[in-house]
Image: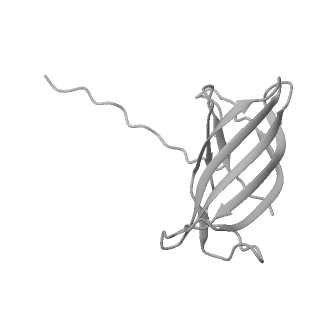
Amino acid sequence: MELTNLMTHTTDGIALVANAGELPSMPGWVGAGLFFTEGHGAWQATGERTVEVTFVFLTLNRAGSLISTNAARATLDVDAAGDAFTGTFALELVSPDGNPMGADRGALRATRIEAAPTASTPVSGTPNVRTPAVASPAP
């Protein structure tokens, strides 16, 4: 199974992850109708090109009820150009009453989003939004 997310790591050690939509049904772990919230956390360098990251996020059902609080910890290896990383993660899920609900481990990979000039061709699938001209106030 592969999940697609957007991650942001700021220069002051803040880490954010935007999780995407409803989780797929995973036998023995997650049924349909569950969602991960956005994740908030921190990162720190552990070497010249290695990083540790921790995110905390929630699992909610369609009604918005809390199903679990989750902690994901990852060890990342950043490429020499600083444009991509690979790594591994460990995920722990805890019920609202504090009992362990499950765990998972897996691999991560990511590529930096590059800045592009505003006159460039939009990224595929991006809506073409035009800002109306600003009107000048009448005297």
Residue 107 picture location, percent across and down: 84, 51
Q: Quadrant of the C terminus?
A: top left
Considering only vertical position in the picture, is 7 above or below 133? below
Considering only vertical position in the picture, is 119 above or below 130? above
Of residue 74 and residue 34, the one placed in the foreground of this image is: 74
Q: Is residue 117 left or right of residue 106?
A: left
Q: How many marks overall? A: 0
Residue 25 occupies quadrant? bottom right
Q: Residue at x 64, y 57 (%)?
A: 70
Residue 118 occupies quadrant? top right
Of residue 79 and residue 126, the one placed in the foreground of this image is: 79
Residue 13 occupies quadrant? top right
Q: Quadrant of the N terminus?
A: bottom right
Residue 23 picture location, percent across and down: 67, 67
Q: Residue at x 68, y 35 (%)?
A: 43
**Which scheme is used to colour this image of the protein?**
one colour
Query: Residue extending furthest front?
Result: 98
Query: Residue extending furthest left?
Result: 139
Residue 33 picture location, percent across and down: 60, 74
Residue 51 picture location, percent across and down: 77, 33
Q: Is residue 66 left or right of residue 107?
A: left
Q: Residue at x 46, y 40 (%)?
A: 130
Q: Residue at x 83, y 27 (%)?
A: 49
